[in-house]
Image (cartoon, rainbow, N blue to C red):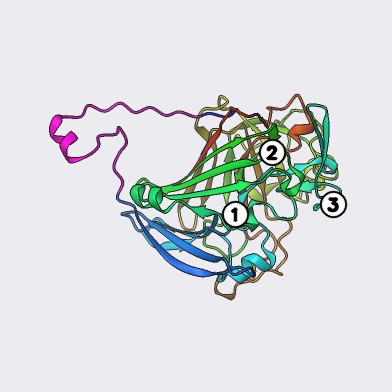
Amino acid sequence: MKTSVILTTLSCSLLIGLLSSCSGTKQESTTMEKSLYGKTAEGTEVFLYTLRNKHGMEARITNYGGTVVSLLVPDRDGKLADVVLGFDSLASYIADSPYFGSIIGRYGNRIGKGNFDLNGVKYTLAINNGANHLHGGLKGFDKVAWIVDERESKAGKVLVLNYLSKDGEEEYPGSLSVKVVYSMTDSNELKIEYSATTDKPTVVNLTHHSYFNLAGAGNGNILDHELFIDADRFTPVDPGLIPTGELKSVRGTPLDFITPTLIGARINDVYDQVKVGGGYDHNWVLNKPANVLGIAARAYEKTSGRVMEVLTTEPGLQFYSGNFLNGTHVGKGGRKYDHRYGFCLETQHFPDSPNKPQFPTTVLNPGQTLTSTTVYRFSVK
């Protein structure tokens, strides 16, 4: 399965060794605070955790769905703004969230017709997106209260979340033990590390689903953002947005973001893949080596100067241009999120991989450990 290992060798003197663990990783100045965020309908307390680095960059994350509620990032003048869409209250996330900022699982993206075969057994999942299965089903990982490892979180000033998805949950086989670690660096990076083990063969595809607007959440659409995606190929989809199985070149199509291009420049093109997606809602096949942390995409917003780079160990990236946002969701500060007010860059294995043996496998077997890392790195120009 997916593994990313980064080794850093440091020369540590005896004096430094006495003052620190000299673990080979740079000591960050991130702080973390905890506050009560609300309760679920079942009475489970939900908390909000605020990670903050020395530059004032701040991520507020709730253990309900592992959701990034807000992300404050400086512009070229040092002014902070919240660059992710979301709500002001837990109740709104529970009532009707289009996956704003959440951890997605057990299987991120779509599985065609909600069916797949694994080792000769057919599994039938919930149909919750047209004729297909989307983002783990009716109650995916975005709709559960994750358990916070308070001891590990406190020690590392990182947020460590755990969830046990029991055998048969949303009709998936195997009890899946999942760990997600959120951390922030003084290089203005929000880092997400995933790991999972299972007691039976299963399929799993974990991702993060923040909607970004680098001008600030609710500050207009994202069509003037310039986007680079380091991918020469994508996976074409049918009218239900299920991959056909082909890996197609982006060259000469509106899906070519090798040369940085404004999101809105070709979003209404007559090209069939743009029309079927209602804009961009496709998986790009990344150029970087498999299982190696490398660049996937870069977005730039000229009025603020904010730049967001996405690095991942995953082989694919779903770029979604907010096509289904329509103003019905009232977000933070009472602002409505209209058509294309946010975009997603979801690092992932490919959609419908359980039914596409030619795609990188999403099967996890007992004795294996899934590992995956994604970094959202912010800067200005």
Compare residues 9 and 310 and report the one nearer the observer: 9
Instruction: Count neighbours of disc 1 (C-alpha within 10 A) and say few if under 14, some if 14 to 19, many if 20 or more.
Output: many
Amino acid type at image mark 3 = Gly
Q: Position of residue 304 (x, y in %)?
A: 46, 57
User: Residue 314, how many percent across, how many down?
Assistant: 58, 33
Membership of 36 in magenta stretch: no
Residue stretch rendered in magenta on the structure? 4-28
Judging depth in this view, the residue of 341 and 149 nearest the camera is 149
Q: Which mark is residue 130?
A: 3
Closer mark to the observer between disc 3 and disc 2: 2
Q: Residue at x 63, y 38 (%)?
A: 348
Q: Residue at x 57, y 40 (%)?
A: 228
First in residue order: circle 3 vs circle 2: 3
Picture coordinates of residue 235 (x, y %)? 74, 34
Front position among marks 2 and 1: 2
Label 3 Cα crowd, 10 Å radius (few <14 / some 14-19 / many 20+)? few
Earlier in the chain: of badge 2 and badge 1, it is: 1
Q: Nearer the viewer, residue 318 or 59?
A: 59
For label 1, the residue is: 102
Q: Name the residue type under label 1.
A: Ser
In the image, residue 190 above or below residue 14 = below
Amino acid tagged 2: Gly
Q: Does residue 357 appear in this view?
A: yes
The answer to which of 23 and 226 lies nearer the viewer is: 23
**Most extreme residue toward the bottom, as rendered?**
334
